[in-house]
Amino acid sequence: MQELKAKGVPFAMATVVRTVDATSARPGGKALLDRDGKILLGWVGGGCARGAVGKAARDAISSGDPQLISLRPQELLETEGVAVGEVRDGVRFARNGCPSKGTMDVFVEPVLPLPEMVICGTGLVAMALASLATRFDFKVAVHAAEGIETDADVTRGFDFDTSGFVVVATQGQGDQNALRAAVSTDCSYVSFVGSRKKFKTLAARLVAENADLEPALRTVHAPAGLDINAITPDEIALSILAQITRLRRAGLTHGQVRDA
């Protein structure tokens, strides 16, 4: 688990929570599954269970939602009037084809990489946002313009590639370079800390350089954050994180976030 987490690889943990009659696994049995539903380690039953557990793992990783599956013999499913794949009260039913005719309930929990947030800039707003985002379980990377004196944890230059969230908070220190880098990635969200007038000026310059950037520039949230009448750096950081959180929790895909 620690190795997969360190690599930023999604996986799922399956745990047997209940058994009835004869089953090859017992309550408390666990297995680690990859994004394809393949068991990497552990045991939650033989071939009769692996298919259903593997599918639940794939669904959990894809949706980000845990799955509770109940494997039951066909006769029991028919008696209870439940179809294979049907969901009732949060439980998805599957067929257990083993001769043992046992029932087994398995909880499958996805473990996903932390969402990435790239922050361009080292000013008060950027540092406030970096601190706040870390506490909300974002994987934060801070970039600064070349030649800017920075701490050891800050990367010089705007050479980054992310599918996550990018906030340009350079505030006069490499604005155009940072914005160019942000809209050149396939990230979910880009926002710009500054006035609408300043953003429009920078956007016009970038389009003059490369007209292909115009569609991406139209999706930039400028000014960044929700309108909460923020004034202080901490309040501005809060408004930006609130905007990102609202989009994340809406369950939008990358492209949908950029269009929201």
Image (spheres, rainbow, N blue to C red):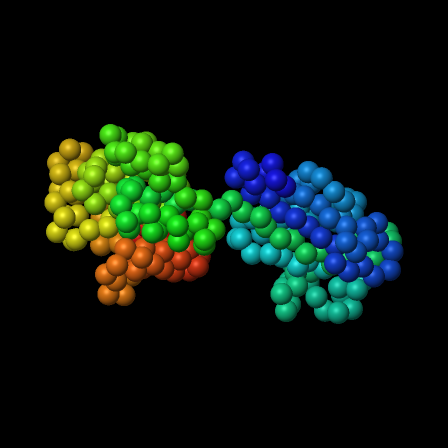
The residue nearer to you, when weighing 45 against 148, is 148
The x, y position of residue 71, in whole percent, is 74, 57
Left or right, 52 with respect to 62, comes to right
The residue nearer to you, when weighing 54 against 42, is 42
Q: How many marks?
A: 0
Above or below: residue 70 compared with residue 155: below
Q: Quadrant of residue 184?
A: top left
Inspect this view and state whether residue 215 appears: no
Left or right, 58 with respect to 216, comes to right
Above or below: residue 192 compared with residue 212: below
Above or below: residue 201 compared with residue 233: above
The x, y position of residue 106, in whole percent, is 71, 56
The residue nearer to you, when weighing 165 against 208, is 165
**Quadrant occupied by the N terminus:** top right
Instruction: Write the residue at 34% across / 51% down.
Output: 128
The x, y position of residue 44, in whole percent, is 76, 48
Residue placed farthest to the top in the image? 147
